[in-house]
Amino acid sequence: MEPLTEKQQKVFRFIEKRLKDNKPPSQKEVAEYFGLAQNAAYQLINYLRNKGYLVDLGGHRGLRLSKEYLEKKRQTNGIPVVGRVAAGEPILAEQNIEGYIDLKDLFRQSKDRFIVKVVGDSMADEGIMDGDYVVVQPKQRIENGQIGVVLLDDEATVKRIYIQRDRIALEPANKAAGYKTKYIKRGDKNVRIIGKVTGCFRML
C-alpha cells in the first residue's frame, strides 16, 4: 500500500474513527469537518481509494475500510486493545479494536486474548486502579470468586464474579469507597460474562 501524505492521513483517521463508531461520513461531512470545498474532499477521498485504504460501496455514506487495509492491521503484533464492547457483536470485531500492545515479556500471547482499559476504582483493593489495563481471556463461564469482565447494557465492568442459583453477584473490591455488591438475575439478556482477567498492568 502506498504511504499517505499528512493531509491524507488526517482525513483517513477521521473516516476510520467514524466507521468504528458506526457513523460512516458523507463527502459533505468530510469537507465541513476539515473546512474544505467538496471538490477538494472528493479528491482526497479518491486518493485514499486509489492507494487501497478505502472502498466505496456507493450511496450517500458508502465509504468503508478496504480488505487490504484491514488485513494489514490484523498482522500487527501484540494483544488487541478493545475500546468498546457491544451486545450481539464479536468482541474482537475490527471496529472494536483501538490498537495493539505487545506484552510477550509479561503475559503469554494468545490469539483470542484481548485488553480492556479499566474505568473507575471499584477494584482498587485488588490492585486494579482507574486507568489500568487488564488482560482478558474470553470465557462465558468462570469459576466462582474469579475476577472477570462482565457486559452490562453495553458497558464492560471488571468485578469479582459469583454465580449463584438464580442470580450473579458482581463484587467490588474497595472497602474505603463503600461500593456495594451488584446482583443480577441469571438469564438477564442485558448481562453477559465475556472473560476472565488474567493480568493487569499500567502504562507509565
Image: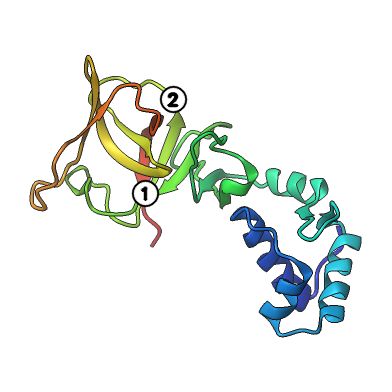
What residue is pinned by disc 2? 139
Residue type, numbered disc 1? Phe
Q: Measured along the vertical axis of the image, is residue 107 above or below residue 64?
A: above
Residue at (17% x, 42% y) in the render: 173
Residue 160 location, x and y as percent?
24, 33
Residue 96 vs residue 129: left or right? right
> Which of these two is toward me, 35 or 175?
35
Mark 2 crowdedness (10 Å alpha carbons): few <14, some 14-19, many ≥20: few
The answer to which quarter of the image holds residue 4 is bottom right
Residue 146 location, x and y as percent?
27, 27
What residue is pinned by disc 1? 201
Query: Which mark, by number, is residue 29?
Result: none
> Which of these two is toward me, 1 or 7?
7
Q: Secondary structure at mark 1?
A: strand
- Quadrant where the C terminus sits is bottom left
Question: Along the polypeptide, which appears first: circle 2 or circle 1?
Answer: 2
* Farthest residue, direction right: 50
Residue at (50% x, 39% y) in the render: 114
Q: Measured along the vertical axis of the image, is residue 21 above or below residue 75?
A: below
Specify whether residue 195 is in view. Answer: no
Q: Total marks drawn? A: 2
Specify whether residue 8 is in view. Answer: yes
> Which of these two is toward me, 155 or 123?
155
Residue at (35% x, 53% y) in the render: 132
Residue type, numbered disc 2? Lys
